[in-house]
Image (cartoon, rainbow, N blue to C red):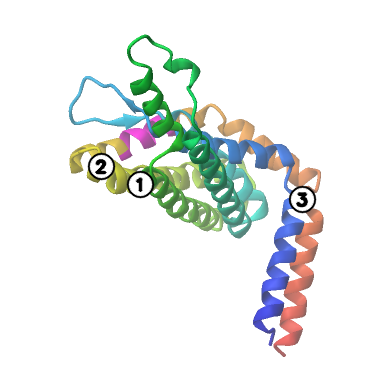
Amino acid sequence: MLTLKRKIKREWNAFLLLMKNVPALVVVLFVMSVFAMNLLANKSIDLPWDWLALDCGIIVSWFAFFTMDILTKHFGPKAATQISVLAILVNLFFCLLLFLGSLIPGMWGEAYVEGSETLLNGALNRTFGGTWYVVLGSTTAFIVSAIVNNFSNFGIGKLFKKNPDGWAAYILRTYVSTAIGQFLDNLTFALLVSHFFFGWSLLQCVTCAVTGMVAELLCELLFLYPGFVITRRWKRNKVGEAYFEFLEKDHENSDHGNE
């Protein structure tokens, strides 16, 4: 049996190898989408219906789920979730930097409006510096939705025995998992933040989750086929081969150790 120290070391080595094997541009865009999504969540969208409420995070949050879907398809749900946690940690680090920047004395360029400098500067500091409940709510919502999205995507893919890498399998696993994940992400954030701190009703929270999910699915529809092409190309070019070999060898060693 492996000791706890050896298990931790094994998992860490596997993660380091994963980061070497995932295309760097994918990781960069994923991290940036998570950061931008949480920053834009501070701005609500004016709508003519009282029962409907949305925030500007929806214009980029679909990309985070799109990235998780292609990572899950190729590297598996565990790897996709690990990279999701990495994105969250990077986001929290930069949120801290923005908060520290908001504490530094000085004036934002957009605050120079005669008679309103102090008011506008304070508002900009609070926006970019963030508030604890927005950061906490967005982080919690994304963790929950990422885990659900990644493992439901993987589970749906297992239903396709004959052609797991086909177009139909990719569409179903991507759209169903994204719909569930997006709904949970929007609903969790709305309940934790918008309901308690912005005065949204429960109906607004639910309608925000549903309509936000639909809007984000429509955005992802534009990149559904490119995502399918990317995963096919990764498999054809054997992207991540060293990572998969490490996992296979580690699994074999674990089996021998348990005998």
Q: Which secondary structure class fits the magenta region best?
A: helix
Q: Which residues are magenta?
A: 209-216
| Label 1 SS | helix
Earlier-in-chain disc, 3 versus 2? 3
Residue 146's tag is none
* Quadrant position of the N terminus in the picture: bottom right
Residue located 42% across and 38% down the image: 130
Closest to the camera, between mark 1 and mark 3, is 1
Is 207 left or right of 242, judged from the image as shown? left
Closest to the camera, between mark 3 and mark 2, is 2
Residue at the far bottom in the pictured view: 259
Instruction: Give the vertical position of 141 relative to 40 (above or below).
Output: below
Q: CA distance from mark 3 to mark 2?
A: 42 Å
Earlier-in-chain disc, 2 versus 1? 1
Q: Which residue is mark 3?
A: 21
Q: Which residue is mark 2?
A: 197
| Label 2 SS | helix
* Quadrant position of the C terminus in the picture: bottom right
Instruction: Give the vertical position of 162 relative to 13 (above or below).
Output: above
Residue 73, image x and y in percent? 62, 49
Residue 133's tag is 1
Nearest the camera: 74 or 85?
Answer: 85
| Label 3 SS | helix
Residue 2, image x and y in percent? 69, 84
Residues marked 2 and 1 touching at CB (< 8 Å): yes
Is 48 left or right of 238, judged from the image as shown? left
Q: Residues within 10 Å of mark 3 (few under 14, many from 20)?
A: some
Q: CA distance from mark 1 to mark 3?
A: 35 Å
Q: Quadrant of residue 248?
A: bottom right
Name the kind of residue labelled 1 in the image. Tyr
Name the kind of residue labelled 2 in the image. Phe
